[in-house]
Image (tube, rainbow, N blue to C red):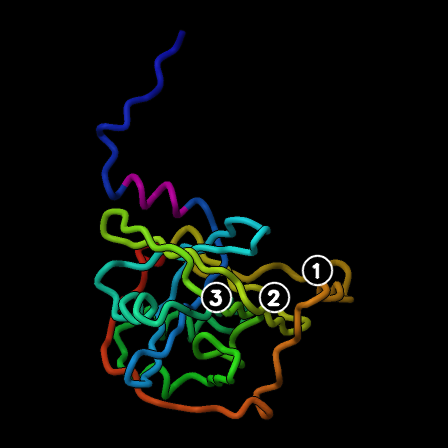
Amino acid sequence: MREAPSTNQTGQDDFRALMAGFPTGVAVVTVVDADGSPRGITCSSVCSVTLAPPTLLVCVRNASPTLAAVLAAGRFTLNLLDHNARPTAELFASGDPRRFERAEWAIDGGACGPHLVRDAHSIADCLVSRADRVGDHTVVMGAVRRVLRRKSRRPLLYGLRRYSVWPEPHDPAPAPAPAGVADIAAPAAAGHHHRTALTAETASHRMS
């Protein structure tokens, strides 16, 4: 019987190289903190958990002000970025404290955080159902309360330490949205509210 390979010698560089070979979509996690300021961070550590009830997870570094605001508010919004949104992914992965002044966003009564109406192909409003600290990150489970989708948008991808775009579909006609999934309102009708985020932060380890 062949022995399983030892994991004792695995370091951070090996782990980064491993996960770089697993391309993902790119998202921005957003929330409004207790004083009404928007916060957000780029994250590719996103995963579906279960359909019943609809639940997803995001992993955010423990020192993140966005994480602190998410845990305090008990809610967050997941903005899945479209193929034109690389500048927004890089903006929210930077330490720019004025990122929300440079992004187009909106928030309504049903939102759990700012919606990036120009840059997201899909948006999920989530309530925090569980949070577990693992090493230097926290895994946050989000019970999905609402999903919005924009038609005819392709996802932005990240892998091998670079961005890419989902290829054009062979069938130009987009599939209809599932029952209960609304389309994202056009930016002109969204009623934007712009504020300045107070604290700069960097992106999750998956984007490094």
| Mark 1: amino acid | Pro
Q: Is residue 156 above or below residue 192?
A: above
In this view, the residue farthest toward the top is 1
- Decide: marks 2, 1 in contact (CB < 8 A)? yes
Judge whether residue 17 is colored magenta. yes
SS state under label 1? loop
Q: Give the image quarter of residue 150.
A: bottom right
The quarter of the image holding the C terminus is: bottom left
Q: Which residue is mark 1?
A: 169
Q: Which residue is mark 3?
A: 126
Q: Nearer the viewer, residue 78 or 20?
A: 78
| Mark 2: amino acid | Arg
Residue at mark 2 to residue at mark 3: CA–CA distance: 22 Å
Q: Mark 2 or mark 3: which comes first in sequence?
A: 3
The residue drawn where x is 35% and y is 69% is: 41
Residue at mark 1 to residue at mark 3: CA–CA distance: 29 Å
Indicate the position of residue 56 as horizontal and vertical percent values: 49, 55
Indicate the position of residue 190 as horizontal and vertical percent values: 56, 89
Q: Give the image quarter of residue 98.
A: bottom left
The residue drawn where x is 23% and y is 52% is: 136
Q: What is the span of residues highlighted in magenta in the rendered image?
A: 14-20
| Mark 3: amino acid | Cys
SS state under label 3? strand
Which numbered circle lies on residue 154? 2
Q: Mark 1 or mark 3: which comes first in sequence?
A: 3
